[in-house]
Amino acid sequence: MIQEYTDLMLQTEQEKLFSEAIKEGLQDFQVKMAMLDGYITVNILAPWLRTVCVNQAIYTAIKGNPELGMTVEVCIAGAYHFLKVTIPDRNLVVLLKHLPTEEEVPDYSEYRAQFCGSNQHRLQAEGKVIMEEPKQLQFNFGDFQLEDALINDDPLELPFCLVVTYDGRKGADTDVFQGALTPDLAKWIFKSKITNQSMQPETSPASSTPPSGNGGKVVTIPLKLDIKPEDEGVQQGGPTLKQSAPGAQTGRKGDEESGT
């Protein structure tokens, strides 16, 4: 069944980059945490620092391997910085998420729901099996570049969102997965393990300097969200694409409350 979605998944060399860079970022995190040994409230910082280290490794690896056909930009939702990876030739967007092994799917967040909002519409347009009939999308036109796709009424021009997950608590021993979520984030449309991939030796190592975005450009996403510093994955906010996601009303704990 998963073979049906291969054209919407990371290619082998792209899988290798994500797998190795995530593990490299987690190793970097462990080194930096060791430097903070003895600080009594270090656990407040730990989830954020882990995300920073993984993001840095991914950012540097993608910038160092342009032949893989991926671009990466730093986006801001509220006070939170996150990475949006784009694969332009197939109109794919890739997000990152720490996901504990015992949890089936990430907690609901408006940020991911908005990016995943068009997944089932794209599948339907490509004639692939979908889990349920896509719900009506509502868009708030602004900076998000979906106007042409909607004007032309061509769902094939809508982006398809992948989420790459890892269990940051396991460090470099974590398995890494890629998958696509339904718009309510309640189910995986598909999910595939990509661990055990290895880049060639020339893969760029993570730099200790923070990324500067695309030539210094940082994309700001104007959503107002309550963000608590306890959360590792305060992966909130998103484009100005609006999706009415049923998961928002199910009582599932959002990212800002997870404390993972």
Image (tube, helix red, strand yellow):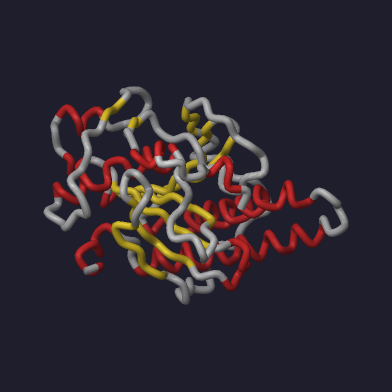
Q: Residue farthest to the bottom?
A: 196
Which quarter of the figure is the N terminus placed in? bottom left
Q: From the viewer's side, name the closer residue of 219 and 225.
A: 225
Residue 99 in view (yes/no): yes
**Image location (x, y in percent) of residue 138:** 27, 28
**Image location (x, y in percent) of residue 101:** 52, 65
Q: From the viewer's side, name the closer residue of 185 and 48.
A: 185
User: At x 42% / y 48%, what residue is drawn?
Assistant: 85
Quarter occupied by residue 57? bottom right
Q: Is residue 117 left or right of residue 14?
A: left
Q: From the viewer's side, name the closer residue of 149 and 41.
A: 41
User: At x 24% / y 41%, what residue is drawn?
Assistant: 158
Q: Residue farthest to the right?
A: 38
Q: Is residue 222 left or right of residue 188?
A: right
Quarter occupied by residue 29? bottom right
**Image location (x, y in percent) of residue 69:** 36, 55
Residue 217 in view (yes/no): no
Q: From the viewer's side, name the closer residue of 196 and 111.
A: 111
User: At x 27% / y 57%, what residue is drawn?
Assistant: 8
Compared with 30, 247 (above or below) is: above
Quarter occupied by residue 192? bottom left
